Image (cartoon, rainbow, N blue to C red):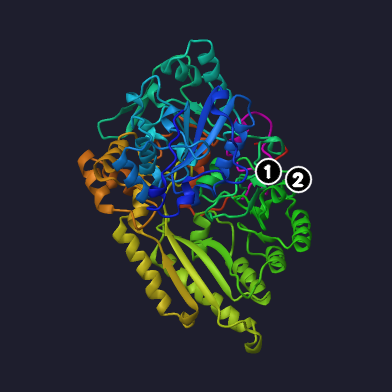
């Protein structure tokens, strides 16, 4: 294969050329001529962001442990290199061998957030692979998608040959082995391979599913091309976490990444059941790794990487059953070896704060907490499961522990939200600042209390109880943010309060993509091919005018896709997917939300979500028979 390493003159023209040279510590080098199948694993964002994603390292490690398979990596070129590659007709290449992506067998793209959709087209375009799956020939790579956005793959379905739905450790290798076998036996064709692959659990081939629409634009059904493939695709779940592949020799990037440290995944899933949270729903059931496994990870990953910091990864680390024992081990080891510990996803309680006080410089760090809503009424609507008393008690513990900085995350535009709920956000911040001044004597204070309130705008996601909920137009989101700001200035302790908020137009675009159908792909394709739109997640590159023009051209109405409340009987573009949650459960939770009724978390009481359908047995959290 022809090597395509960038010349020195090009590297001198681009920002951070180390993004493109490969050869990092622990990257895998195989001879491409001696492997049967070549796989490229792509993260469609800049190198520093992609190198921080643990999922891509897990799959990279999994494939490269297989004899006869070689997995290389790929990230989105930054706009400066993108421009040069287009001007000089340089095909996009892999990091490991610097060879053309278009010459590989598979291009796998992990899709972690909707705002990378145009970057997917950038990857295909620079690789000189036809953007639409229907235009690809026998020699083009099989383009595969995976990740959380595939819980509604329809807005990007025309760009992909197939999707893996669920966790990649389960049967991804089996599908690649099918490709290898068909090639070896001389019976391979693109259509035949995709037909056979579609018979595997969790594999979705968009070309075999044709959506049928009603006159009003809503979905009516799907026509499935073959009778011998499932009409309902079931996501795959890795239940035995101790025997799952894990990259104990992590790749160490040349450019400092967002998570430049050893990352230890301690569990998957979440017991909490927040109604807005897609990850908390679709990653059920909760699955923990044993202490012995985690300790073995720590020993090997520190020695193989040279990192001096460890971060624990999960949706809710405080809920890991063995957290206390594991932290005792980490604190002892890290104290002896001068290694730092990072603990995201902790609840603000006495135990968590005690742990944090042992591992953080409290005079420099802040305590981060996500109440999500300012009023108790709204916290009950979203099933946050935390009271005002618990918030104040946790803050009191933090202040007495030496912290004076709190960072609080909220959402605006949640279902049933009123102006009173909005104004409760800065009032809560004011009450927390007042608590600091009441609890901590003046001569013991570490400066003024600093309460930072950050709001994002609610985006309803598939397979959540809020999948039926409407969004609000950008001007309404802005009004809500201004109400927070104006109310903050009225507070007695306003000098201790700081407010940050996000870009509402980006949130609305995310909402259209999140719940869109296959017709939305036309607008995505036009925005990239006609306007060169990429890096929409980056505010400096986002262009709302381009997207408004694209939607106008193809009849994509924000009123239809984002702002209307969906009726309970509406067929969604993702309803051909079985993610394990039953429709009655989601409907019940939506009705509970409208009534402000709490549902106990999974550890306290089975919520009857239907997770037993994910492969037999019982949910990890409920060893007794499910109701």
- Front residue of 627 and 521: 521
Which residues are the magenta region?
600-621
Q: Which residue is mark 1?
A: 248
Q: Are marks 1 and 2 in contact (CB under 8 Å)?
A: yes
Q: Which residue is mark 2?
A: 296
- Residue lying at 45% horizontally and 51% vertically, measured from the top left: 17
Residue 427 in sight from this viewpoint = yes
Residue 385 at what x, y percent from top left? 58, 57
Q: Nearer the viewer, mark 1 or mark 2?
A: 1
Does the magenta run of residues contain 610?
Answer: yes
Residue 402 at what x, y percent from top left? 66, 76
From this view, report whether residue 437 is shown above or below residue 84. Answer: below
* Farthest bottom residue in view: 443
Q: Quadrant of the C terminus?
A: top right
**Label 2 CA crowd tier, 10 Å (few <14, some 14–19, many 20+):** few
- Front residue of 271 and 590: 271
């Amino acid at each position: 294969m022809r090597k395509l390493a960038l010349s020195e003159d090009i590297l001198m023209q681009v920002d951070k050329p180390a993004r493109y040279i490969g050869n990092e510590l622990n990257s895998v080098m195989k001879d491409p001529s001696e492997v049967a199948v070549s796989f490229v694993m792509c993260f469609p964002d800049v190198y520093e962001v992609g190198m921080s994603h643990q999922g891509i390292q897990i799959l990279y490690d999994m494939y490269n442990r297989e004899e006869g398979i070689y997995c290389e990596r790929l990230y989105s070129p930054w706009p400066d290199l993108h421009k040069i590659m287009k001007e000089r007709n340089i095909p996009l290449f892999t990091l490991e061998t610097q060879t053309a992506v278009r010459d590989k067998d598979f291009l796998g793209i992990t899709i972690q957030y909707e705002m990378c959709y145009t970057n997917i087209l950038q990857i295909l375009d620079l690789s000189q692979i036809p953007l639409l799956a229907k235009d690809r020939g026998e020699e083009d790579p099989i383009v595969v998608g995976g990740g959380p956005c595939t819980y509604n793959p329809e807005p990007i379905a025309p760009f992909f040959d197939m999707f893996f739905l669920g966790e990649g450790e389960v049967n991804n290798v089996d599908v690649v082995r099918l490709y290898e076998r068909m090639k070896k036996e001389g019976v391979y064709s693109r259509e035949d391979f995709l037909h056979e692959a579609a018979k595997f659990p969790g594999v979705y081939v968009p070309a075999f599913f044709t959506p049928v629409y009603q006159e009003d634009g809503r979905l009516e059904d799907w026509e499935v091309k073959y009778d011998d493939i499932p009409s309902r695709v079931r996501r795959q779940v890795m239940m035995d976490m101790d025997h799952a592949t894990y990259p104990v020799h992590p790749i160490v990037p040349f450019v400092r990444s967002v998570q430049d440290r050893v990352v230890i995944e301690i569990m998957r899933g979440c017991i909490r059941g927040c109604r807005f949270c897609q990850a908390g729903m679709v990653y059920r059931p909760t699955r923990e790794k044993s202490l012995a496994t985690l300790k073995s990870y720590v020993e090997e990953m520190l020695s193989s990487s040279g990192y001096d910091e460890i971060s624990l990864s999960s949706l809710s680390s405080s809920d890991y059953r063995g957290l206390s024992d594991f932290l005792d081990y980490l604190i002892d080891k890290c104290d002896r070896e001068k290694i730092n510990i990072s603990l995201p996803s902790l609840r603000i309680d006495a135990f968590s704060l005690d742990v944090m006080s042992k591992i953080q410089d409290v005079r420099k760090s802040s305590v981060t907490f996500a109440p999500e809503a300012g009023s108790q009424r709204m916290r009950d609507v979203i099933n946050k499961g935390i009271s005002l008393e618990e918030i104040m008690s946790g803050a009191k513990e933090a202040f007495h522990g030496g912290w004076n900085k709190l960072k609080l995350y909220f959402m605006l535009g949640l279902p049933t939200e009123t102006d009173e709920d909005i104004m409760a956000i800065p009032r809560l911040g004011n009450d927390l600042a007042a608590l600091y001044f009441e609890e901590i004597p003046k001569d013991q204070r570490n400066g003024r209390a600093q309460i930072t309130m950050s709001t994002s705008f609610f985006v309803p996601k598939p397979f959540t109880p809020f999948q039926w909920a409407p969004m609000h137009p950008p001007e309404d989101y802005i009004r809500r943010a201004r109400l927070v700001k104006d109310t903050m200035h009225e507070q007695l302790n306003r000098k201790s309060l700081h407010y940050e908020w996000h870009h509402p137009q980006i949130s609305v675009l995310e909402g259209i993509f999140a719940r869109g159908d296959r017709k939305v792909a036309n607008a995505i394709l036009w925005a990239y091919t006609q306007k060169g739109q990429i890096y929409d997640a980056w505010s400096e590159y986002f262009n709302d005018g381009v997207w408004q023009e694209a939607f106008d051209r193809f009849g994509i109405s924000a009123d239809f896709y984002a702002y209307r409340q969906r009726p309970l009987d509406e067929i969604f573009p993702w309803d051909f997917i079985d993610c394990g949650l039953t429709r009655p459960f989601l409907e019940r939770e939506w009705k509970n939300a409208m009534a402000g009724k709490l549902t106990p978390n999974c550890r306290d009481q089975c919520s009857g979500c239907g997770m037993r359908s994910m492969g037999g047995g019982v949910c990890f959290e409920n060893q007794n028979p499910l109701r």
